[in-house]
Amino acid sequence: MSLVKAKKHLGQHFLTDKNIAAKIVNGLIHTDQYHQILEVGPGMGILSDILLERTDLETHLIDIDVESYHFLQEKYPQLGSRLINGDFLKLDLGTVFPGKFAIIGNFPYNISSQILFKVLEHRDNVVEMVGMFQKEVAERCASKSGTKEYGILSVLIQAYYDIEYLFTVKPGTFNPPPKVNSGVIRLSRNKT
């Protein structure tokens, strides 16, 4: 099984540190409220390896990259139709997940805002999201009212989700390394 080559046009930076991957997956704390999870952009499956060990979760993967999709098909033949080759932004989430579910991923920085807006669109079903974004985007999402980072994205997300900035990830833990630090955040659906 040959490794997947990161594609610049897809904004791919593959996480290589298993400890960071475990910390991201351990960021899921509301698993009593859902049993299905969608990993967006699994790449070569560093998060997927940990997610698929969990018996409390039914893991689904979606990747737009055909090379990643074939790599993951070979790596996880047990997934069958739970491995999707497609664009998360165009996926009809309501059809795939008729009930409550969560989203997780090391998200491509070039579409991070669109990913967050898609989560907001499906806020009645997305109980929780744990994701890695460019650090500035993660900080903006988690910023409080009155700070200079606080903006429309912060307002919209915080209207429906409690948000926590979990930790920062350095560029050296990726292949290829991005030019910026990354930040991991957790969105938990609030009762509003």
Image: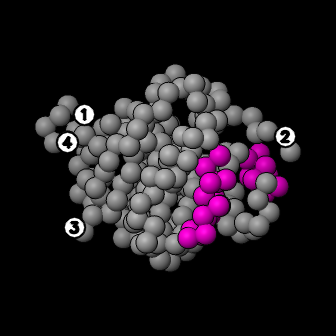
Q: Is residue 142 above or below residue 171?
A: below
Q: Residue at x 82, y 55 (%)?
A: 74
Residue at x 67%, y 67% (from the top left corner): 82
Q: Disc 2 marks which amino acid? A: Ser
Task: Nearest to the eye among marks 1 and 4: give it.
Answer: 4
Residue 13 seen from this side: yes
Looking at the rendered structure, which numbered label has been put on residue 144?
A: 4
Provide the secondary structure element on which disc 1 rests.
loop
Return the mark for residue 185: none
Q: What amino acid is at disc 4? A: Lys
Give the magenta part as a residue range.
46-74
Q: Which residue is mark 2?
A: 2
Spot occupied by residue 16 in the image (x, y as percentages of width and height): 64, 35
**Does 130 sit left or right of 139 as displayed?**
right
Mark nearest the camera among 1 and 2 is 2
Q: CA distance from mark 1 to mark 2?
A: 42 Å
Q: Looking at the image, is mark 1 or mark 3 earlier in the sequence?
A: 1
77 left or right, relative to 31: right
Residue 153 visible (yes or no): no
Quarter containing the N terminus: top right
N-terminal label among 1 and 4: 4
Disc 1 crowd rating (10 Å Cα; few below 14, some 14-19, many 20+) is some
Q: Amino acid at mark 1?
A: Glu
Q: Residue at x 60, y 31 (%)?
A: 174
